[in-house]
Structure formats: structure tokens, C-alpha cells
């Protein structure tokens, strides 16, 4: 027996990846799916809320649209880059060989790992260039360190020898970077100050981002456990994961209500409960991965509603 033949490997993950090597090459639809479009709401939400908070500070009619647009490019570039980087890292580790959900580019063998890595780095590069432009415009050179930390965190979520996403720390990182840092950072680069409104919005959006990750990991819990990926859902169990998910999803509406006491337009954001409550019910009663995928989609839109709703409440 030729032990160098990956198709005969004793590792079922590596063997599965090898057996998929002859898969049909991914077309445009495959690459779009790899970008995980439904998660991009998590990039738009903090920029919308942070921009609204900046308008509160700058005053009515003062809108730094160029800086806001650059913030959006940074957020989208990081989000898409993270998604492709996760595809690459999970694929080469063999983690995706246990997947029961939609096939990934690397794990399915539809695209070579190197190509997926290059695309991930391209989007990280786009985010870095937009971030550098913001640093130049604001002359706040210390922001370079923040950007570097964000890029490192994006890569080591599933990359490197000891990815923190495999140690139950994914939700914490998502809360910090796609909640607090993204929202407060958007406000700061526009007006060089971060208000209480921005911090509160960042907490709310960060919690929803945690809910998105939790329901995604709940769907993949059994497969992740087999692959040795110790997400928070794997660590705390299925029932606790559902409870924590509901807390992540519904707690932001308490923050929204508090903000609405000062910014009445914020009450309209509570219409997001029309999606959040069904998502919570689906997650708590789900029997199939398809149901959890639906809950994930609903949760992603909840984040968008909260981000845009709070941004509008602040601005108008």
C-alpha cells in the first residue's frame, strides 16, 4: 500500500477531501456562495449605526460620506476575507469533510486551496487599503495598530496552528470586532469622538453577531465535535446553546428600547422582533439543519434592522 496516497489515508477528514478532488470546478455561483452573502449584514449594520451616532455629534446635515463609505469597504472587505479564510483553513484541516450543510470551496475540492487563500488575501488587502485611507484622512496613526489587530484576529479565527475559533472564543471575537470596534470605529473616524450612543449600538449589534455565529455553530455542532473543532456550542451543549442564542438575539432589543426613550424613531426598530421571535422559536424547536439555516438568515436580517434602524433614529 502506498501510504503517500491521500485517498487511502487513515484520517477520514483528509480522505474525504482527497476523494472530492475531482469535483466540478466552482463557477461564479460557487464563489458568491463562498462569500456567504447572508453574513454581510453584519458588516453593514455597525457602519450604519456608527454613522448615525456620528451625525448626532457633528450636528444635523453634517455627513462625512467619504469616510462612511470607506468604513463600509473596510467592514465588507474584512467580512468577506474572513469567510474565504475560514473556507481555506477549515478545508485544509479537513474540518469541512464532516459538514452536512452547503459545500465549501476548499473542502469540496471545487477550488484549489491556494486560489481560495489568494482571494481571501485580496479582500483583506482591500480592507487594509480603505483603512489606510481613513488613517490618512483622520491623521490618527495609532489606528494602524487597530487595523493590524483586526486583520490578525480575522486570520487566526480558524487559521494558524491554534485557531481561537476552535477553542470557544469565536463569539467573544465577533462581539468585539463586529460589534464594538466596527461601530465605535465608524463613529470615531468621522468625528474623532465616540459617544454613548455608539457604544450602546455596538453592544446591541455585537450581540446579534454572536447570535448568528451561535446558531451557525449549533447547526454544525455534531460535525464540529467529530472534527475536533471546540466551538462554544460544542463546549456548552445543545440545550445551553439554544438558551444562549436566545439571550444574544433578544437582549439587543432591551438596548434598543432604552435608546428609543431618547430617540423616538428607535421604537420602529422593535419591528425586528417580527423576525427575532420566529428565529428564536425555530432554533429552540429545530430538528433539522435546514431549520437552523432559516434561523440564521432571519438572525442576520435582525442585525441589519437594528443597525440601520438605530442609525436612522440617531440621524433623524
Image (cartoon, rainbow, N blue to C red):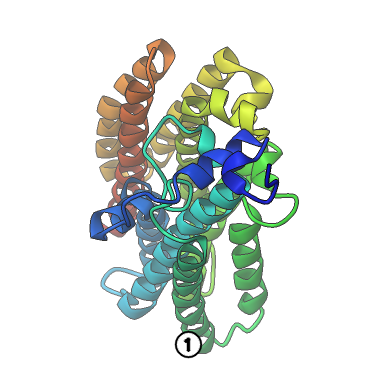
Residue found 51% across the figure and 65% down from its top: 117
User: Quarter holding the C terminus?
Assistant: bottom left
Q: Nearer the viewer, residue 164 or 149?
A: 164
**In this rendering, would 286 be left or right of 143?**
left
Can residue 193 be seen? Answer: yes
Secondary element at image label 1? helix
Q: Residues within 10 Å of mark 1 (few under 14, many from 20)?
A: some
Task: Specify the quadrant of the image occupied by residue 130.
Answer: bottom left
Whole-percent x, y for residue 108 in the image:
43, 46
Q: Residue at x 63, y 25 (%)?
A: 234
The image shows residue 113, relative to residue 271, as above or below, that is: below
Residue depicted at x 41% and y 58%? 111
Residue holding disc 1: 137
Instruction: From the viewer's side, name the closer residue of 84 and 282.
Output: 84
Residue 222 percent coordinates (x, y):
56, 22
In the visual, does 148 lie left or right of 68?
Answer: right
The image quadrant where one finds the N terminus is: top right
Query: In the image, residue 305 lies at what x, y percent?
Result: 29, 43
Q: Which percent across, then down, holds residue 74?
A: 44, 69
Which residue appears farthest toward the front when viewing the image?
1
Amino acid at each position: 500500500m502506498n501510504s503517500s496516497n491521500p485517498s487511502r489515508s487513515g484520517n477520514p477528514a483528509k480522505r474525504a477531501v482527497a476523494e472530492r478532488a475531482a469535483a466540478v470546478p466552482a463557477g461564479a455561483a460557487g464563489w458568491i456562495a463562498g462569500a456567504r452573502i447572508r453574513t454581510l449584514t453584519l458588516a453593514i449594520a455597525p457602519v450604519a449605526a456608527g454613522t448615525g451616532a456620528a451625525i448626532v455629534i457633528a450636528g444635523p446635515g453634517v455627513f462625512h460620506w467619504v469616510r462612511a463609505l470607506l468604513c463600509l469597504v473596510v467592514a465588507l472587505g474584512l467580512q468577506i476575507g474572513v469567510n474565504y479564510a475560514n473556507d481555506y483553513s477549515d478545508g485544509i484541516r479537513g474540518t469541512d469533510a464532516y459538514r452536512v450543510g452547503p459545500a465549501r470551496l476548499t473542502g469540496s475540492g471545487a477550488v484549489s486551496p491556494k486560489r481560495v487563500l489568494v482571494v481571501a488575501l485580496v479582500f483583506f488587502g482591500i480592507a487594509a487599503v480603505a483603512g489606510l485611507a481613513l488613517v490618512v484622512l483622520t491623521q490618527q496613526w495609532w489606528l494602524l495598530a487597530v487595523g493590524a489587530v483586526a486583520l490578525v484576529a480575522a486570520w487566526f479565527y480558524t487559521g494558524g496552528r491554534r485557531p481561537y475559533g476552535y477553542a470557544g472564543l469565536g463569539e467573544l471575537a465577533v462581539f468585539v470586532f463586529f460589534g464594538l470596534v466596527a461601530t465605535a470605529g465608524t463613529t470615531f473616524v468621522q468625528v474623532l469622538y465616540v459617544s454613548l450612543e455608539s457604544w450602546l449600538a455596538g453592544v446591541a449589534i455585537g450581540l446579534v453577531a454572536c447570535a448568528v455565529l451561535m446558531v451557525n455553530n449549533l447547526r454544525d455542532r455534531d460535525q464540529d465535535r467529530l472534527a475536533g473543532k471546540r466551538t462554544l456550542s460544542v463546549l456548552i451543549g445543545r440545550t445551553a446553546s439554544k438558551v444562549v442564542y436566545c439571550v444574544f438575539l433578544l437582549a439587543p432589543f432591551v438596548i434598543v428600547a432604552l435608546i428609543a426613550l431618547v430617540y423616538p424613531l428607535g421604537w420602529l426598530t422593535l419591528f425586528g422582533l417580527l423576525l427575532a421571535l420566529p428565529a428564536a422559536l425555530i432554533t429552540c424547536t429545530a430538528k433539522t439543519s435546514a431549520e437552523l439555516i432559516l434561523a440564521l438568515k432571519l438572525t442576520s436580517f435582525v442585525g441589519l434592522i437594528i443597525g440601520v434602524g438605530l442609525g436612522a433614529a440617531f440621524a433623524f
